[in-house]
Image: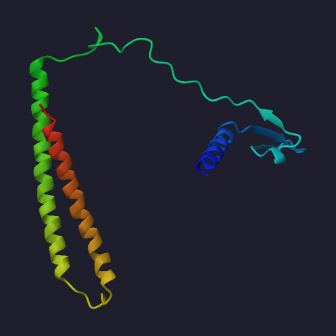
């Protein structure tokens, strides 16, 4: 039984791989494509071959920078790296303050119960923007910390 199932599976896979595509043109000149032989009466088969495999690159990528590639001296690069690190640290401090404020706003909203919110889903809907704001600032802080870890 298993052998029969395996043989039938392989047959279907073979047919699926070798399916022919037919191009049909009606009296109005409209084109239609099909892979069903019974629908393809009067149509011409298309010769569709699988795409060729990509060739391996002929030469390895060049090592190092080209001779005319612009470069800066070590002192200038060090100054740029220092400036970049300072800017990232300022952004991190700013995001941490914004996160603290967003958490405070969320905490204030969580203790408030409005009379129109008898259904708890309305409470969740009201709190959702505050939770999203907290999540946004947490994600920003994580990204800034990751970026700071990658600086020289």
Classify 148 as above or below 127. above
Question: Residue 73: x percent and y percent?
Answer: 14, 16
Specify the quadrant of the image occupied by residue 64.
top left
Classify 91 as above or below 131. above
Question: Residue 11: x percent and y percent?
Answer: 67, 42
The tally of labels here is: 0
Specify the quadrant of the image occupied by residue 81.
top left
60 lies left or right of 35? left
Residue located at (21% from left, 52% from top): 140
Classify 100 as above or below 26. below
Question: Residue 25: x percent and y percent?
Answer: 84, 41
Q: Residue furthest top?
A: 67
Q: Nearer the viewer, residue 129 or 83?
A: 129
* Way the structure is coloured: rainbow
Residue located at (19% from left, 72% from top): 106
Residue located at (60% from left, 28% from top): 51
86 lies left or right of 28? left
Question: Residue 114: x percent and y percent?
Answer: 25, 87
Check the picture and name the quadrant holding the C terminus: top left
Q: Residue furthest front?
A: 1
Q: Nearer the viewer, residue 52 or 18?
A: 18
117 lies left or right of 112? right
């Amino acid at each position: 039984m298993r052998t029969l199932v395996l043989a039938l599976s392989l047959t279907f896979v073979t047919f699926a791989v070798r399916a022919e595509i037919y191009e049909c043109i009606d009296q109005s000149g409209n084109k239609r494509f099909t892979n069903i032989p019974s629908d393809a009466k009067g149509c011409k088969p298309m010769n569709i071959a699988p795409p060729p495999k990509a060739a391996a690159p002929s030469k390895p990528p060049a090592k190092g920078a080209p001779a005319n590639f612009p470069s800066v001296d070590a002192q200038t690069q060090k100054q740029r790296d220092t400036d970049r690190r300072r800017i990232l640290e300022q952004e991190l401090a700013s995001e941490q303050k914004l996160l603290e404020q967003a958490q405070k706003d969320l905490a204030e909203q969580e203790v408030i119960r409005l009379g129109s919110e008898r259904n708890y889903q309305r409470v969740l809907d009201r709190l959702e923007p505050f939770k999203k704001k907290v999540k946004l600032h947490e994600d920003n802080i994580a990204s800034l910390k990751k970026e700071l870890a990658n600086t020289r």
